[in-house]
Image (spheres, helix red, strand yellow):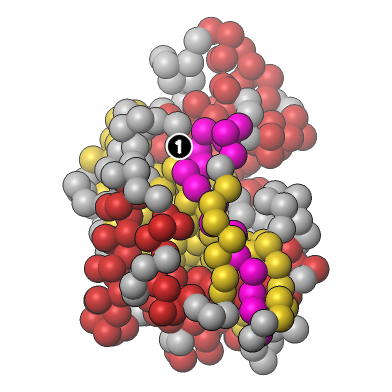
Amino acid sequence: MSLLKRREFLLGNTPSHQAKANDLEAWNQGLPVLLKAQCLKSLASHNLNIKQTELLVGAILEEKDCDSILAKSPYAERLEPKFQSLGSVFNEGDRQEIEMVTFDVMDGDNIIAEDLWLKASWLSFNEDDASLRFRFSFGIDLEEDVAADPYRQQLGGELTDAVFPESAIITNNVELEKKLKKILGSDGVSFVERIIYFNAPNGGAYLHHDLERGHAGVVFAQLTGSTFWLALPKETLIEEIIHFSQTHSWPDSLTQEMKSEMDKLANNRSQLCAQLDSFSNDSLVHLINETEEFVQFLISRGHSITLEPGDVLLLPQATEETCCWHSVFCLGEEMGQALSFAIRAKV
């Protein structure tokens, strides 16, 4: 068993036994699908790429400029001449953003696509959480309808490949592709809106979803380190919150005002659903992410998964009702690298 600690909150221990893994058919019910050791054989061949990425992360943690690093070997040779850096953009209004590097895509002297970007960001505001991610997309962040532009999505994937060649651990995995084609009911699969994660000790992600129009879900591959997950469909999460309210007292860390608010939400399903979607209700956020009682309750109900290097986790995200909400913890004392790619049927 390992201690669960995230953003200074102590949340008990991991279970002694892993819950039974779901099969591929569970995807359509919004359940997570664990593929043990799915990409384990590919890790050795990408060892140098993974080590290089660790050096990049180390430089970012030392406040080095990402754009300057990408202008040097080995990145420059992989980016040029197709991907032309336009330099860095810094959003002072976003405390989590570290740096955004923008690119034009070239064909000789011609620009064939504009405004692709790589954004490095912290995963939280906690000063003792070094977790970060590199996200690839295009256009105006959080406003662009990325699903409407599959061409730039494809180019964003190629940009990811150039900076992080270990992306092939997912994209060139023939057996994984067969399984994804099966669950998508498609002759092809596209890996889009890609993220490279580094979850650090005391870090991770609070319960959230990755629902986005046009995307079927997310494939997550653990490359180094270990992570612990809580993952369940939204409707099930709603049911579990209500069930918890009926079988447990509210944790002592909730103020009386917060307990009263949770009493009201637990008795009004539509309001509970709305507040969950808002990500801004302090009482609800605290209960489901920061209390040992609720985290251990979800574990006892069979909603936990542990990922080791080489494991792959599939997270369906097709509809608001069935999208798989998930929460992540770093296990151990080492920061771990992972790939997280949205998937869609190839158009």
- Taking the spot 50% from the left edge, 38% from the top edge, the residue there is 96
Do we see residue 272 in this rendering?
no
Q: In this view, does 81 lie above or below 280?
A: below
Amino acid of disc 1? Ser
Question: Does residue 275 show up magenta in the picture?
Answer: no
Q: Observer-nearest residue: 308 or 271?
A: 308
Q: In this view, does 155 lie above or below 336?
A: below
Q: Observer-nearest residue: 244 or 277?
A: 277
- According to the picture, the residue beneath numbered tag 1 turns out to be 124
Q: Observer-nearest residue: 301 or 148?
A: 148
Helix or strand or loop: what does disc 1 sit on? loop
Horizontal arrangement in the rendering, residue 175 relative to residue 292 (left or right)? right
Counting from the top left corner in percent of width and height, residue 9 is at 34, 29
Q: Quadrant of the C terminus?
A: bottom right
- Taking the spot 28% from the left edge, 61% from the top edge, the residue there is 54
Q: How many other residues sit within 10 Å of disc 1, few (<14), some (14-19) or many (≥20)?
A: some
Predominant secondary structure, magenta span: strand
- Taking the spot 47% from the left edge, 44% from the top edge, the residue there is 98
Q: Is residue 116 above or below residue 171?
A: above
Counting from the top left corner in percent of width and height, residue 8 is at 32, 28
Counting from the top left corner in percent of width and height, residue 220 is at 46, 66
So how many labels did they put on this image?
A: 1
Image quadrant where residue 20 sits? bottom left
Horizontal arrangement in the rendering, residue 29 relative to residue 20 (left or right)? right
Question: Does residue 99 show up magenta in the picture?
Answer: yes
Q: What stretch is highlighted in magenta?
A: 91-107
Counting from the top left corner in percent of width and height, residue 282 is at 57, 23
In the displayed orientation, state which residue is furthest to the top.
256
